[in-house]
Image (tube, helix red, strand yellow):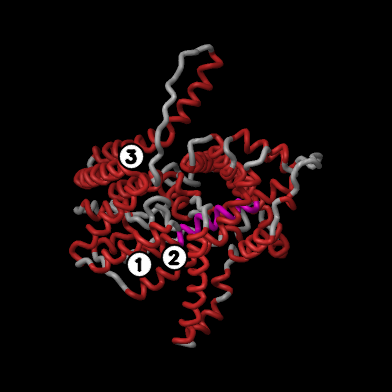
Amino acid sequence: MVFTSPVFLFLFLPAALAAVWLSPRQVRLTVLLLASLFFYTWGEKGYVFLIAFSILLNYALGRWIESLDGRPGQRRVLIVAVALNLATLLFFKYTPLLLDTARSILHPIGLTFTLPNVSVHLPIGISFFTFEAISYLVDVRRGTIPATRSPIKLGVFLTLFPHLVAGPIVRYGDISRSLDHHTLDVAQAARGVRRFIIGLSKKLLLANPAGRTADLIFGQDPSLLQPSAVWLGAVCYTLQIYFDFSGYSDMAIGLGRMIGFELSENFHYPYVASSVTEFWRRWHISLSSWFRDYVYIPLGGNRRGPLRTALNLLTVFSLCGLWHGASWSFLIWGWHHGLFLILERWFRRWNVPTQWELILAWPRRLYMIVVVMIGWIFFRADNLSHALALLRAAVDFRNPAGHPATDYVQLELAIVLGVGWIAAMPLAPMTKPWRDRLERMGGLGRTVEWLLLLALASLCLITVVGGTYDPFIYFRF
């Protein structure tokens, strides 16, 4: 069940909120766990037993790791615990890729025996709750958090329905206080409603219209597209994936506040970055910080010389690409970003004169957005050959017979692209004086704010009732 579906908005969400707010504090976490498991069961049916097993397994492993408390066996138990979590992820997510890769290696050397064709259903959100479980176990081993004595609390941490299927990736320490002393606050819930409406608007009013055009263009044979059409598709997808995922994160944060939890921010205007390095400080912050703290730094980070740093970065972004999907195109996407981060570290050794900083500001932003858009072509393409064909079409200016961008531009798309690029800018800091003025107006200011939110919510509900195109990109990871 997706956040934008009528079933969620009109049935599940009101019922879940009523159950949580009306429950006594002593049983509230149990109610939240049952609601979250029901939410997952609605879409995944029997696979809910997989996540239930993960809760019990990681609860027992966390207690075991803590009980060893610095003894030599503690590290071995942690390795086994992490391996068990990764084995589940590897089986469900990477079995087809591993078998296909084995076939491609064995066939050229004359080994013609057939490997089985295995179709494995990928449980929604498995990458997210696996990484959360690993972070919990590692943090227990490091001593930064105690192992919880309550499987209910661990279950709520892993399955809380706002972040269960598409993040943000939560760490136990970030919400442990809310788990131990769960309270509900009307002001916090009101801020949650605001944030949810903003996220819903991003998804339905910006991401979906941009996504329809992106799907239309990338669904064409690349040889039938002029470069302008390919770049229009890349622009549309660049906006779609940002407003789709940041909109989902806004909704998750808003829902968390409605039920008494503060989830971490996941985006900070990534398209205003002036380098790929800065982009990754602003994009999917919970994932990039997870890889930094649990992979990059343990590998040595940047402490062992430039060559080791480059290898560590390439390793991290290889894993980041594969985390997003079991496909060579995702791996190339990871290498693409990793190589630019390595190059940027090398170029940063050259000191740029201060007077050049202002002159280079916009060229740097242009460089960043072009690099990111090329990466999104690999990310969006059906496979690696499709991505390469799209890139060839993007620079093939000798193909006058293909479809130009004007074949796809309509008034709605032009409005969405204009509003989208404005909305991707840091408007909140720029509009702070206006918002402060509304705050000083007291009741009138709040009325104006809620009327604007009500107008957005009404447009969203009209779109929900009448719309059919409503994919969530990050649900498949």
Q: Is residue 418 left or right of residue 402?
A: left
Q: Position of residue 180 (x, y in %)?
A: 24, 62
Residue 32 image point, x, y percent:
27, 58
Asked if residue 314 lies left or right of residue 126, the reply is right
- Dot 1 and dot 2 residues touching (CB under 8 Å): yes
User: The residue under label 2 is which amino acid type?
Assistant: Phe
In this view, the residue in front, 60 or 65, is 60
Nearest-to-viewer mark from 2 and 3: 2
Residue lying at 63% horizontally and 43% vertically, measured from the top left? 218
Indicate the secondary structure of the residue bearing disc 3. helix
Neighbourhood count class around disc 3 (C-alpha, 10 Å): few under 14, some 14–19, many 20 upward: some
Q: Earlier in the sequence, mark 1 or mark 2?
A: 2
Report the magenta residues as a range. Answer: 235-250
Up/down of 332 relative to 210, above or below = above
Between the residue at mark 3 and the residue at mark 1, the CA separation in whole angstroms equals 31 Å
Q: Secondary structure at mark 2?
A: helix
- Mark 3 belongs to which amino acid? Asn
Q: Find disc 2 in the rendering and name its residue.
A: 196
How far apart marks 2 and 3 lie (CA) works out to: 32 Å
Q: Write down the residue under mark 1.
A: 258
Pinpoint residue 327: horizontal percent, then vertical percent: 52, 35
x then y, percent, for residue 163: 38, 55
Of labels 2 and 3, earlier in sequence is 3
